[in-house]
Image (cartoon, rainbow, N blue to C red):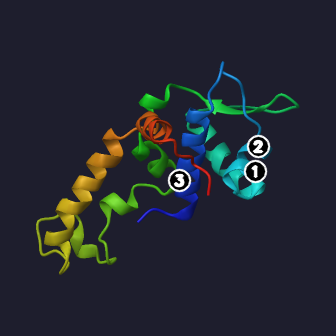
Amino acid sequence: MISNTCKYGLRAMIYLALNEHNHMMIGIKQISFDLDIPKPFLSKILQQITRHKLLVSSKGPNGGFMLAKPANEISIMDIVSIIDGPDFFENCLIGLTTCDETQDHAHCPIHLEYAPIRNELKTLFTTKTIGNLASSISESGGTVRV
């Protein structure tokens, strides 16, 4: 469904939303340690998200990352699109070219059953925000740790 890289990106964004106090930057070492994600790998993921202006980053001893806009304005789909791209929602599940939604011809053998599920998932990812996820975790006393 979504890649591990994307899952790490989502976890990091939720972590930043949960730990957003007084608009302070959180260092990559701290995020990496708390989420148990290798620092170089996490750094690349967060820089990719930063390039799309969902995070602000700063170098130096007081540097780190913070959300660039409110967590309730960042959808799961924003992160999935940045990291994994739109392929999951646009291409055939089994890789056939016959599932192109813009074409009026036969589809793959699973298309009719899969299309509604894909649409539901797309709606969920578009409407559910990082803020929603962070609030749910916070209210349940959970954590985004491993």
Distance (Cα) linking label 1 and label 3: 21 Å
**Quadrant where the image shows the N terminus:** bottom left
Name the amino acid type tagged 2.
Gln
Q: In this view, does 123 lie to the left or right of 31?
A: left
Q: Residues within 10 Å of mark 2 (few under 14, many from 20)?
A: few
Please state the horizontal and vertical placement of residue 143, each as a whole percent of the image. 56, 46
Residue 132 falls left or right of residue 46: left
Q: Taking 34 as reference, is 134 above or below it?
A: above
Label 1 sits on residue: 33
Q: Which residue appears farthest toward the bottom when viewing the image? A: 109
**Of the residues tagged 3 and 2, which is closer to the observer?**
2
Between marks 1 and 2, how big is the CA–CA gap?
5 Å
Q: Are marks 1 and 2 in contact (CB under 8 Å)?
A: yes
Location of residue 58 in the rendering, given as x and y in whole percent from the top left corner: 76, 30
Task: For the residues labelled 1 and 3, say whether their Cβ atoms are less than 8 Å apart.
Answer: no
Determine the CA span between mark 3 and mark 2.
Answer: 22 Å
Residue 83: numbered disc: 3
Q: Is 123 above or below relative to 1?
A: above
What residue occupies the far right of the structure in this picture? 61
Closer to the camera in the image, 2 or 32 = 32
The residue drawn where x is 42% and y is 45% is: 76
Rendering coords of residue 71 (x, y %): 49, 31
Decide which of 82, 20 is in the foreground and name it.
20
